[in-house]
Image (tube, coloured by chain):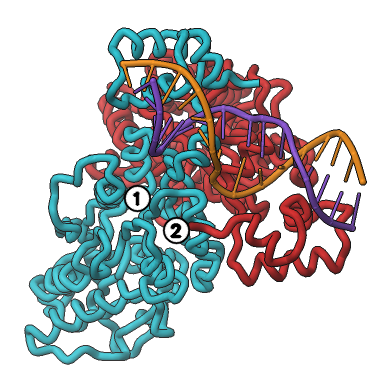
Chain colours: A cyan, B red, C purple, D orange
Amino acid sequence: MAVTIREVAESAGVSTATVSRALRGLPYVDDATRLRVLAAAASLDYVVSPSASRLASGRTGSIAVITPFIARWFFSTVLSGVEQVTHDAGLDLLLLGVGDPDRPSEVPTEQRLRQRADGAIIVALPADDPDVQALLHANLPVSIVGSLVPDVPCVAIDDAEAARKATAHLLNLGHRRIAVISGSRSGSIYTTQEHRYRGYCDALSAVGIEPDPTLVAFGQFTREGGEQAMVELLNLTHMPTAVFCMSDEMAFGALVALRRRGLVAGVDLSVIGIDGHPQAEVIDLTTVEQPVESMGRFAAESLLAVLGVTAPPERATGLVPTRLVSRGSTAPPRDGG
Amino acid sequence: MAVTIREVAESAGVSTATVSRALRGLPYVDDATRLRVLAAAASLDYVVSPSASRLASGRTGSIAVITPFIARWFFSTVLSGVEQVTHDAGLDLLLLGVGDPDRPSEVPTEQRLRQRADGAIIVALPADDPDVQALLHANLPVSIVGSLVPDVPCVAIDDAEAARKATAHLLNLGHRRIAVISGSRSGSIYTTQEHRYRGYCDALSAVGIEPDPTLVAFGQFTREGGEQAMVELLNLTHMPTAVFCMSDEMAFGALVALRRRGLVAGVDLSVIGIDGHPQAEVIDLTTVEQPVESMGRFAAESLLAVLGVTAPPERATGLVPTRLVSRGSTAPPRDGG
DNA sequence: ATGAAAGCGCTAACAC
DNA sequence: GTGTTAGCGCTTTCAT
């Protein structure tokens, strides 16, 4: 089988305890001894058995990422950021999918999670879901991406502000009839869409416009959903001149709907998104960018700090800035609004 | 701390051995006993300690995914497919990034890998890299996505055929001067680009066209790279009328370059990709689709079959079909070529 | 069908 | 500084 610590100990002429100390860089080991141990371990291709180490120490040396989606851009980009940090810290990364996201009760229990990870990063899971709540209140270090929860390390954008920024951009261009494509109609478990809706309303109110409920459509945060939502908006008797989409992916769908209708974004109708998806540049979509990958890194660093593995990240707060990137999909309304 | 098997045993009035058997569904346990054990475990919220179980049994109950990129569409989509399968099988999924992909020697060693997973899925790692070779020859079940390696479970498309299909599509439209945007100039460690280049040449040869080396550009399989490569092609004295891009992401870049130049894809110049990236539909890009998510699922199923966890997947072979999807970015040449 | 007991390979007191 | 020793919580023979 595999080389064990005993063989290294024998080869180096010391006890297993000393090998353990030497290999982990603990103090109270003579430099000469440490060198001998290191050499022996290297020459034997020794690798500690994580199972044994975990069992004995109680620490797993791994952290879990819990997320409802893996393939979507936002999530995989966060994941990538997290992975960079855990990789550098020498920790294992466990990926825990959560089955169907709208029935997120495949969220692992505290017990199950604690058995396999020292901490967890929760990506865009509804903070008010009972199972998620259970995890948050559990005595397990957790870091959250995508929403702000009191007393828990978090990283997120100011959703209301981002939405305000997007809406204000359209208002500044002269639009007055501005629709919004939100997530799901049924007061979703996710708070993101509520905050963004508030920002949208705030921006309108600030210039004396009453939000019009007929101008709200729902796109489930998917491309297909965005497309369908846009179709509904285009079928309105009194069409909007601009559409604020709560995500770039939905905006992409909206652009498809537009094209199918023979309309041109930025000419016939303005479209803006939120995310900073790489494809936004390709398709010339105006959007409010959020620094997704570094949000993943930040979440991981915060978690490692709580675990005492590394120093806390430089940036103190988890509220990260967004940036409006104006492109061809937004322009003044065709005929004065 | 956590509830242990002993407490379950006491609560159920049996030995720990019986609890272990009952919980794992092993034979030779009285039905009544099993029920009692199950009830006791449930009421105590008992969860087996994977570390202990792994240490004692030698099996880790997890599988690793080794990949150079996490955030890119192809990789995260494969990962998503893999996760569905491991999740359903109750296995843990370990995500192992490989640092810088062109210096892929952060590939884990056999020892390290074997200590933490029962098997691995290697996604688009160069099969001829020495470290990858070491893994393949190691006595550890492995499944490969993205290339075909003899005697190893694999899933991939026929790269040459996909490229032939793409190129033939352009030829059929009447194009004769067809450029190609490949990956990297320096005979890359990845074989994908070589196979696709061969397919491209084959298709040309089949209609009596000699491949022209000046019509080959390199885009590193990234959007930015594709954009730059297209710029080079546009600067040619004798411009191509169509461009075959070895990936959709590079094609996206090519489309951006075109737009910046004031040219319209499908009118001034035709562009085709390979992948079936969701954004291809959004941007109206003709492409050769590959079933990426199900490739991930297939790879995972094959691996689990080798591990004896589940039955082998239905589809016998790992060579999956591709499909040409014709969209607006390809059309007959402007003026008869 | 069930139990007793010996590890799996490591870590962490504690002793020296 | 280093060694001894007792577990960590399971699984797995081997008895019974």
Residue at 49% in and 56% down: A113
Quadrant (top left/top right/bottom left/bottom right) for the C terminus of chain A = bottom left
Residue closest to the eye, A255 or A200: A200
Residue at 55% in and 14% down: A7
Instruction: Evaluate if marks 1 and 2 touch, with contact meaning CB atoms under 8 Å apart.
Output: yes
Query: Chain ID for label 2?
Result: A
- Left or right of B56? Residue B128 is left
Residue at 37% in and 63% down: A124
Q: Callout 1, which amino acid?
A: Val
- Up-down relation of residue D8 to residue D5 (above or below): below
Closer to the chain start, of discs 1 and 2, is 2
Whether discs 1 and 2 lie on one chain: the answer is: yes
Q: Callout 2, which amino acid?
A: Thr
Residue closest to the eye, B116 or A7: A7
Residue behind mark 1: A78
Residue closest to the eye, B294 or B87: B87
Residue behind mark 2: A67
